[in-house]
């Protein structure tokens, strides 16, 4: 019996923020995978090592967590005022599907760096020294992201002294701007608050009726109060991820919120849309010890936030969720804003399992509708490996 040989595909393995992913130029993919469809999904599943019933992705580039089961496809943009098109795929770990329904804010910080290094940005727009401003079209949600990439001697500067909680080593700071971050999801009508309310009563079978803020900003997300579901907001991963009953509860909340937000028609559809919406819980400031052993004092933060991604508590905070946190905090009366003490604010520092993060956003209200023109945060990014990935030739 003959077996197909492996093929090799140019790729770069990058860390962006607190995530890692495999980056491709669209033109380097096999022809069948250069267009959306089953072949592309099958290829990325094999590259990452999914579906894996063991949950480890040993036979692929994934790391067995939502933060490391990601793929990015980039191409030079034909959209006016943009340099590069950025398409993000969240690869399921234990199921055979790729979720294209949202963005990855953490990997957004690596897109500009990759685009410059890969020749996807007009060299005339890239300074030899200073800051390269890379205009990114986020193709999943149809939004613009601006990455400010440091340059030294004609090369992307990746090393530096910027420290990001959740990342072990310092690196160069990359400032990211998410322009008009309210996600234009199908069924949400483009509204930042798809139900038209800052706080809803969300009925969740087996849980009860929860106060919830459901928002489309950066990514669709539902916020609930920690104490309403039996938590303090100081929890680390082990307190949630080893508790099957807790994970089932969060998935039920997420599924019912997805219906209320107009993202799906029935809760049963949530299993095929794991990447969005996210679910998070918030609490007022409190002392806790981060996963690194770092002491976080109540006075260091405005509020506490814990968020789940792909069914598990995230080890830090998703970049897109941070955009939603900053946006919701800027709107007086949301659960996020109230947890931070209420009132008007244009920036917030929140505590997450790995430490703290600051995000800025300015909200305005016009004709009863809230909007945010820009959310800003700093991340870092670094190439970990570049060359080729290999997959069996009959894998897609």
Image: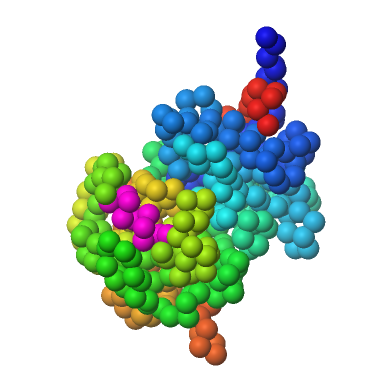
* Image position, residue 133 (x, y; %): 66, 56
Q: Is residue 6 left or right of residue 176?
A: right
* Image position, residue 92 (x, y; %): 50, 41
* Image position, residue 294 (x, y; %): 25, 46
Q: Which residues are magenta?
A: 246-255
- The extreme top residue here reads 1
- The extreme bottom residue here reads 367
Name above or below for residue 131 compared with residue 11: below
Q: Tell whether position 206 is magenta.
A: no
As rendered, which of 3 and 71 lies closer to the eye? 3
- Residue at the image point whose x is 47% and y is 25% from the top: 58
Task: Report whether residue 84 is seen.
Answer: yes
Name above or below for residue 113 compared with residue 348: above
Indicate the colouring scheme. rainbow
Name the quadrant of the C terminus: top right
Give the tally of numbered discs: 0
Name the quadrant of the N terminus: top right
Say which quarter of the image contains residue 2. Answer: top right
- Residue at the image point whose x is 73% and y is 59% from the top: 82
- Residue at the image point whose x is 24% and y is 55% from the top: 234
Task: Report whether residue 359 is seen.
Answer: no
Is the stretch drawn in magenta largely helix, strand or loop? helix
């Amino acid at each position: 019996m003959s077996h197909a040989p492996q093929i090799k595909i140019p790729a770069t393995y990058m860390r962006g923020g607190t995530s890692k992913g495999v980056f491709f130029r669209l033109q380097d993919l096999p022809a069948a995978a250069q267009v959306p469809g089953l072949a592309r999904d099958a290829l990325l599943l094999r590259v990452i090592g999914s579906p894996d019933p063991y949950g480890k992705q040993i036979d692929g580039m994934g790391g067995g967590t939502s933060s490391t089961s990601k793929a990015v496809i980039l191409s030079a943009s034909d959209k006016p005022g943009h340099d590069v098109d950025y398409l993000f795929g969240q690869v399921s770990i234990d199921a055979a599907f790729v979720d294209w329904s949202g963005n990855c804010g953490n990997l957004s910080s690596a897109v500009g760096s990759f685009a410059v290094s890969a020749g996807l940005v007009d060299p005339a727009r890239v300074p030899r020294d200073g800051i390269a401003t890379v205009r990114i079209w986020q193709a999943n949600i149809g939004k613009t992201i601006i990455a400010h990439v440091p340059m030294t001697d004609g090369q992307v500067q990746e090393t530096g002294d910027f420290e990001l909680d959740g990342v072990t080593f310092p690196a160069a700071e990359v400032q990211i701007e998410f322009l008009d971050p309210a996600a234009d999801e199908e069924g949400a009508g483009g509204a930042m608050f798809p139900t038209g309310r800052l706080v809803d009563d969300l009925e969740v079978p087996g849980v009860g009726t929860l106060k919830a803020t459901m928002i489309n900003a950066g990514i669709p997300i539902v916020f609930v109060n920690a104490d309403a579901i039996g938590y303090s907001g100081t929890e680390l991963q082990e307190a949630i991820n080893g508790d099957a009953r807790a994970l089932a509860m969060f998935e039920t909340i997420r599924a019912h919120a997805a219906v209320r937000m107009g993202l799906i028609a029935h809760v049963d559809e949530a299993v095929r849309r794991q990447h969005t919406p996210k679910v998070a819980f918030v609490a007022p400031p409190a002392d806790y010890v981060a996963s690194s052993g770092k002491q976080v004092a109540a006075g260091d933060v405005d509020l506490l936030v814990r968020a789940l991604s792909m069914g598990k508590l995230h080890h830090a905070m998703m970049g897109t969720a941070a955009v939603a946190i900053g946006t919701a905090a800027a709107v007086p009366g949301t659960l996020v804003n109230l947890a931070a003490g209420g009132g008007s604010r244009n920036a917030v520092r929140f505590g997450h399992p790995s430490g703290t993060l600051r995000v800025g956003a300015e909200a305005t209200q016009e004709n009863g509708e809230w909007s945010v023109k820009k959310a800003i945060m700093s991340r870092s990014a670094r190439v970990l490996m570049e060359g080729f990935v290999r997959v069996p030739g009959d894998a897609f």
